[in-house]
Structures are given as C-alpha cells and as structure tokens.
Image (tube, helix red, strand yellow):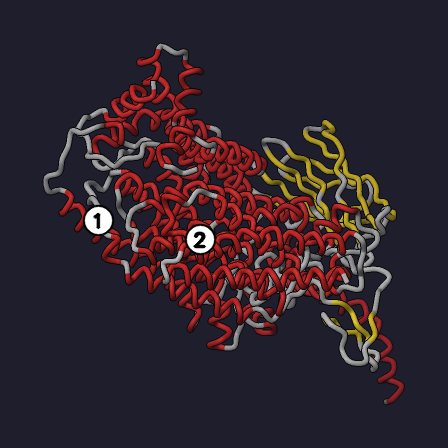
Amino acid sequence: MLAQFGYGVFVLTFLLALFSLGAAVAGYFNKSDRWVEAARRGLFLIFPLITTGVLTLAYLLVTGHYELQYVYSVTSNDMPFYLKLTALWGGQAGSLVLWSWLMAAFAFAVTLRKWDRDHELLPWVIVVTSLTLAFFLSLTILYENPFTRWWQTAGGEFIGRMFAPVGALPLTPADGQGLNPLLRHPGMIIHPPMLYLGFVAFVIPYAFAIAALVTGRSDDRWIRLTRRWTLVAWVFLSLGLVLGMRWAYDVLGWGGYWAWDPVEIAALMPWLTGTAFLHSVMIQEKRGMFKQWNMLLIILTYALVIFGTFLTRSGVLSSVHAFAQSAIGPMFFVFIGITFVTSVALLIYRWKDLHAEVEMHSFFSREALFLLNNLLFMGVLIVCFWGVIFPLISELVTGQKVTVGPPFYLRANGPLFGALLALMGIAPLSAWGKSTFKTLGRALWKPAIPTGLVLAVLVILGMRNWIALVGFLLVAFVVFVTLFEFWRGTRSRQKKTDENFLVAMWKLGGHNRRRYGGYLIHLSMVVMAIGILGIELFQTTTQKTMAVGEDIQISGYTLRYDSLAQFPHADGRIVTRAVLTVFKNGKSLGELYPRYDYYASGQPMTIAGVRSTLADDLYVVLVNWENVSSAQAPFKVYHNPLVNWLWIGSLMFVFGFLVAAWPNRDEDRQEGNK
Amino acid sequence: MKTKSILILSICMPLMAILVPIFTVSAQKATPSDDEVNAIAHQLYCPVCENTPLDVCPTTACHQWRELIRQMLSEGKTEAQIKQYFVDYYGARVLSEPPRTGINWLVYVVPPVAFMAGATLLFLAFRTWKRIGSEPVATGGDPSTQGSGDDIARKPIPNQDDEYISRLEEELRKRN
C-alpha cells in the first residue's frame, strides 16, 4: 500500500512538473501573469511532494520491505540503520530519485526569491527547471521505479512489476541482498549527494541563461543573479570529486585516488566547463565581454551534467563505477540532443545581440589571461571527452574495443594543468583592461625571488625529476603571488586606516570576500597539487608473500609481518586481518592492520592499512586476490609521498568557498540580489 | 640384439632423467618476483573486467594471467613479447592505450589539433580585438574598478602606473 502511495506521489509530481512547464509557456506567450504565477506555485509544490515520496521510500528501506525489488537489492537485515537510509541512493532507481529530489529543492529555492525586478525571466526559468525535473521523474515512473515489487508467476518465475500480473502471487523475501560492500564507506555515502548537488545546482544558472536568451536580455543580469548558485554548484561538484577520490583511495586498494576511469571523467567534465565559466563570467561583469562565450560555457556545462549522469546511470561504458545498467540510455540521449541543439540554436539566434561592450586592449590584461585559462580548461575537456568516447567510436567502426587509460590522460593533460597553475600565479598580478608586459613584469619579480629560492633548495636537496621541479616551482609561485596579494592589499589598507596588520587583513578580506575567498581557493588548489605531484611522480610499490616474522622494505621503511587472524563480524561479514609492525631506522613506528572482508553475498572489500603523515603515506594491502593462508600471506605496499596534502587542500578549499560565498550585504543590496 | 638395446636404454634413461631437468633449468631464469610480474601486469588491463589494471584485479582469471606472465618471464620472454601475446589472444583492449595503428591514430591526433585550432582562433581574435581596442578610449577615470573582486560598475580604464594601490585606496575611501 505504501509502495503504491509512493509511486502515486511520483506520478503526481511528474504531472505537476508538466503542468508548470505548460503554464509557464502559456503565461509567457499570452503575457498572462496568472499563468506564470500558477506555474511558479506548481514548481514550488513539487519539492514537498517529492519529499513525501522520498520519505516513503526511506521508510520502506529502513523497515525492510523486501517485497520491493529495490529494497531487496540494496538492504539486508544485518545492515545498520544509517546504511539502510543511505541505501536510498545505493542503486540505480534510488539515485535517480535523489537527483530529482535535489533538483526539486533547488527549484523550490528559486521560486522563493523575489522576482519583481526580473519577472520577465521567470517563465523560462520555470520551463527549464520543470523540463529537467519532468525528464528525471519520467525515468523514475517509467523505467527505474523504486516501488516495483516481487511477484511469483504461475510458472514459478520471480518477476518485478508495479502491479500484479495475471495469476501471479506476491512474494516477500525474508532478507535482502544488502548494499554493495564498496558502497558502505563514508566517502561513498556522502559522495553521490555532493556530486548530484553540484550537478543539479548548475541547472539554475543554465535556466537563467536560457531565460535571458529567450527574452533577449543581453546584459549580465542573469550572471549576477546566479553568481552564488554557480559557486555553490561548483563547490559541491568539487567536493563530490574529492570525496570520490578519498573513497577510491580507502576502498579500492589500488594505492591511488584517481584512475582516469570513464565515470570519474564524466564527473570531471562539467567541473572543467564550470570552472572555466566561473572565471569567464568575471570578464562579462567587469568588462562586458565574452557574452556569447559565457552562454556557450553554461550550455556545455548543463549538457555535460546530463551526459555525466547518462554515463554513470546508463551503463553505456563499463567501469568499476557503473554498478547499475538499464535501458534508460536512449531517453538520455534524446534529452541531451534536444536540449543541446535547442540551446545552441537560441544562442545563434541571439548571437549579434550579445556583442562585447568594450574591446580587448592588451594580451596581458586580466581578461586576456582569463580567456587563456578558458582555452586550457577547454583543452583538458577535449582530451577527457575524446578519451571517453573514443572506445565507443572504435567499437562502432572497427568492432574492436580499446582502452584509453591513464598514460594517455597524464601525457595530454599534464602540460595543460601545468599551464593552468602558471596562469593561477600570473593572472592575479595583471589588471583589467590595460596591462603591459612591463607592468606585469614589475609585479612578478617580488614573488619570483622566493620562488627561485624554493627551486634552488629543491635542487640542493637532490631533486632531479624535471617534471617535479617545474611542478613545485609553479606551486611555490602561486603560493607566493597569493601571499603577496594579501600582503600588498593589507599594507595599502594600513596606510589609509592605521589599523594593525591582522585587523587590516581581516577587514580587507571581509570587504572583498569574493576576491580573497577566490585566492584562498587558489591556495587550496596548489596545496592539493602538492599531494598530486607527490603521489603521481614519486609513488613506489612492492609486493611480497611473507611468512610470519619475515619483512619487506620500501623507501626506507621496513614492515614485519606479525600475525593473521580471521573472525566473523557482528554484521555477518568474515574479516581477515593481518598485523604488521612498521620500522624506520630500526625504530618501531607502530602497527598496521590491512584486512579484507567477505560479505554474505560473496563480495569482498579490501581495506588497506595506512600510516599517514604530512610527509608520506605507507599504504599496505593484504592481497586477497593471491593465496592467503595462516602460514604465509601476500602484501602489496605503496609508499605515497605527500598525498595527505591532497586532503588538507580540500579542507582549505571549503574554507575558501565559505569566505567567497558568504553573503555580502552591501553587494546584495546594490544588486537587488536577495 | 634386443638385449643390447635394453642395456643401452637402461643406461641412457637414468642419465636422461638427470640431464633433462638440468638443461631445462639452465634455459629458464629463476622464478620472477611479484614486482617483476606486476611491472608488466600494471601495463595491461583485465580482459574481462574493463578498466581494471591486471596487477590489482581480484578475479581468479586475472590471478591465472599474472601466473602466466610469471611463467613467460621465467621462460625468458621479453616485456614486449608478453604484451603482444595478450594482445594476440584478447585484443588491443588489454593495452592501457590504443596501439598507434589505423583509426586509433585519431585518439592521439584529434585533441592536439582541436587545441591548436582553438589557440589559433583565440590568437586571431585577440589581434582583431586589440586592433579595435587600441583605437582611442576614455582613460583616467575612476580607478576603483581595476581588478577588484567586488566592484560592480564597468568603467573606463585608468592610466596610473600603480593601479592596484590606487584601486584599493579608492575602495577603502568608499567603504570607510
């Protein structure tokens, strides 16, 4: 009964989304405020309705209604309450429900804003959000229904249907299959909502962009209105990516955080265009330039958001992430095609209206450097997109499958990321409009001196890897430029106000949150780059099968194998755990406990034993895929220098975002943004 | 005659039993280490479970393939020969990159060509914009718009040298 209720709610919500869509279109063409208001109220109502549906599904999950196919496939009696709850997005159908729910929450927030000044945009913002919602809801009610239940046919066959097939009897299994062990990690519990929040939040700036195109608004109002939405979308997408990296590092037992898997790249692609957009909208705000380009970037970001969901959910590309496969691929394909073609057609139609208000003055101006930054992001996007779709093209044309793996991406993207780091250092020193080689050079030399010293120290310390030297040189350069910018601004304020240095810096940042928050985000990015350079360039690994008492050496560490134990866990899994003692220079540094868990479903999960410091990680895997016995066990050990800085950088990133996005009353009042 | 043959055989058989293993062993190398096996396995992808490198793939099939690599190494096969063996049996998908033949060249050619095309377009556009932009423009206006992250209005470009300081000072003047 509850299942039917939940399904009914989703059908009703879908119809409401269609109503909002139709009412908004009718309101716009008939110039009827009443219809537009009806559409707004419809969109407003969708969120509480979907929430009711989601709560119904959550209740069914936590109370073990295994008669439902979805509940059966992602929960089991031995799972704790919180995992049963988060199993809501542990499978295909549930994750699509989550997508719609988050999208509805953002649409709800949009309907609540004051529309007086931007009333003409409202109908088309409603059209885009309702259309996107209706599409995802249609997937839920037509293809991936989480309320489908089990039936046993007269022939004894078990089938899943929403309503009783003729002659079939309802079936209620006593227990479910349980959540995929790989998804029981905290990182994977938070990763999908974060990623989806980033995905759906980008729909809002896209909706405003389309509204501006349709209504012929060629100013930058839509950008100012969606500035914070864009930042929120970008930060959630970034956090989603970082959490995914942490999950891979902790759970896959591969010793790394990023494998250039197609589904990882699917989430990275909208981040690339989103980051380019975040930078290039500043040019439009400051200089009134690149209006067409910004439109194209947000259209691309939206298309890549849907494309990313399509790759993850359709199973079109097989990978470690594509847990679920279904027949929704063609629906996605058609939707991406229609929205992309329509958006680009609209842009072409308005192309001439979106001309620049001023022209470029210098190759070294900040807008020129931002545009170069955009080119580099587009370069990475091309590499990623091509790398993901080429295996499909190859299979279609030649019938032969190929793999496009890490060597391709690293070789192609490495120089592009290096150039982006360089720009991150140079651009803050340039000015809008006029900036010459001479003025830029004058600003560069001060941070260049300590940067050169860092390089000299690295060479004296024995670093000879030229890629690492270039990488750390760029990291140091960005750090010093950013600190220099803080220092310069603070000193300037001090001259005027007689405040002490800390107060002056605090107030400077407080009055320019977007600018200095952005700098903090730059700093966080280079801190992350330290971790990436460390693990990518200096990772070492070794594997050895050891008897108790034997040891293995790696990068100055010695690991002695002490014991192995196997025991059942309260939740039913069988845990096999080894104990190793770590030594350096003959001194014991503690014990590591690599293990692997076997779940009742037969699925294993490898959990590495990790000793983590700021200098390096010692990452030990009990290699369950080789022969393990009490007499001897195989261990794979990774030495990952500096990798912790990747996670520290991501925490700094959150702080930078909070500074950048914190409401600024003066600014909001000035823009009528609230 | 028959007795003589049996006699020769009875002498040769034990000799062969001793010599054959000796010659066989001398033709093979010592058992390759896990690291030597992984060095090659890491460059290959599991032919069954896609996008999983062979050195970390937990399936039984991959375990056997790693043992096959070990055996081939012990037989003196080179890295290239082993990789070729896997390509011959399972197709090019086992390689971490498409081989540089036929249509596969596209994967290597398209990104740099597209990037260079974008860079060229950008450069040409820059030149056009700069030519237009170098025509007389209003200067010497309000410096507060230069580079600030929060300023709102777009204004003419100042011509002061130290625009940063003047920008901040102007901003401070406005806010305090």
Q: Residue at x 33, y 35 (%)?
A: A426
Which marked residue is nearer to the observer: mark 1 or mark 2?
1
Amino acid marked by disc 2: Arg
Quarter of the figure with residue B159? top left
Alpha-carbon distance for marks 1 and 2? 28 Å
A183 horizontally vs A13: left or right: right
Marks 1/2 in contact by CB < 8 Å: the verdict is no
Label 2 CA crowd tier, 10 Å (few <14, some 14–19, many 20+): few
Q: Residue at x 43, y 30 (%)?
A: A664
Spot occupied by residue A562 in the image (x, y as percentages of width and height):
81, 39
In this view, the residue farthest toward the bottom is: B1
Spot occupied by residue B3 in the image (x, y as percentages of width and height):
89, 86
Q: SS at mark 2? A: helix
Say whether residue A436 is visible.
Answer: no
Q: Residue at x 84, y 60 (%)?
A: A175
Quarter of the figure with residue A319? bottom right
Q: Chain of mark 1?
A: B
Spot occupied by residue A470 in the image (x, y as percentages of width and height):
41, 39
Quarter of the figure that contains the C terminus of chain A: top left
Q: Return the residue nearer the eye: A407 or A166.
A: A166
In this view, the residue farthest toward the right is: B3
Tell me the residue that label 2 is attached to: A411
Return the mark for residue A507: none
Amino acid marked by disc 1: Phe
Q: Residue at x 39, y 24 (%)?
A: A486
A485 horizontally vs A391: left or right: left
Tell me the residue that label 1 is attached to: B126
Label 1 CA crowd tier, 10 Å (few <14, some 14–19, many 20+): many
Say whether residue A33 is visible.
Answer: yes
